Amino acid sequence: MNKKSKVCLVCANGGHYTEMNAIADTYEGYDHFYITYFGPDTTHLKNAYYFKDRKILLYKMFELFFLCIPILIKERPKVILSTGAAIVVPISIVAKIMNIKIVYLDSGTVIGERSGTGKFMYYVSDVFLTQWPEMKKVYGKKAKYWGRIL
């Protein structure tokens, strides 16, 4: 991917944002923007689209699906990079329809079993990364371990 390519960073606020921030050196050289929840740790972000309600209910997933369409059409990212949580699920469906590549980094806090979001993202992501080597066996062949971030 060349440095002119745009990256969409999708993460919930809190720990998922902390994990995204920990890998900042992987995307800082690229034009990038965030899709996240409005929260005390994310209000300072430049180039961010905020959603206010963190409750991920089925109807909220549908709402988020439709809200992210104009964002992705306007921004035209080449890649979605996400550290979770459920905010990435509807966005990744739209990304697949738009032929946008998806890189998902599973949470480092879940060990021994698949994370809630990871259960879905394993199948839709183009690259699926885990932060624990033993989680490759839990997920399957597609899962890659490139190291821990925190």
Image: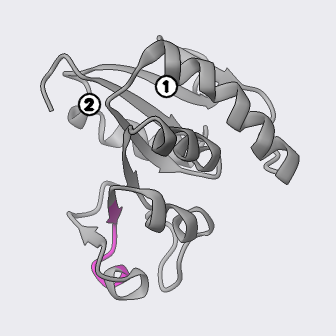
Q: The N terminus appears in which quarter of the rendering?
A: top left
Q: How far apart are marks 1 and 2 (CA)?
A: 11 Å
Image-based side of 144 in relation to 85, left or right: left
> Helix or strand or loop: what does disc 2 sit on?
loop
Q: Which of 2 and 21 is in front in this view?
A: 2
Image-based side of 17 in relation to 3, left or right: right
> Helix or strand or loop: what does disc 1 sit on?
strand
User: Residue tagged by mark 2?
Assistant: 27
Residue type at mark 1? Answer: Tyr
What segment is highlighted magenta in the picture?
A: 128-135
Q: What is the total number of numbered labels drawn onto the structure image? A: 2
Q: Which residue is drawn at 37% across and 80% down?
A: 135
| Residue 30: percent from left, percent from top | 23, 21
Residue 34: give its label.
1
Residue 70: give its label.
none
| Residue 120: percent from left, percent from top | 56, 65
Query: Can residue 40 be seen at all in this image of the molecule?
Result: no
Q: In this view, does 18 lie above or below 137?
A: above
| Residue 117: percent from left, percent from top | 59, 62
Q: The C terminus appears in which quarter of the rendering?
A: bottom left
* Quadrant of the image occupied by residue 37: top right
* Quadrant of the image occupied by residue 66: top right
Residue type at mark 2? Answer: Tyr
Q: Which residue is drawn at 22% across and 33% down?
A: 25
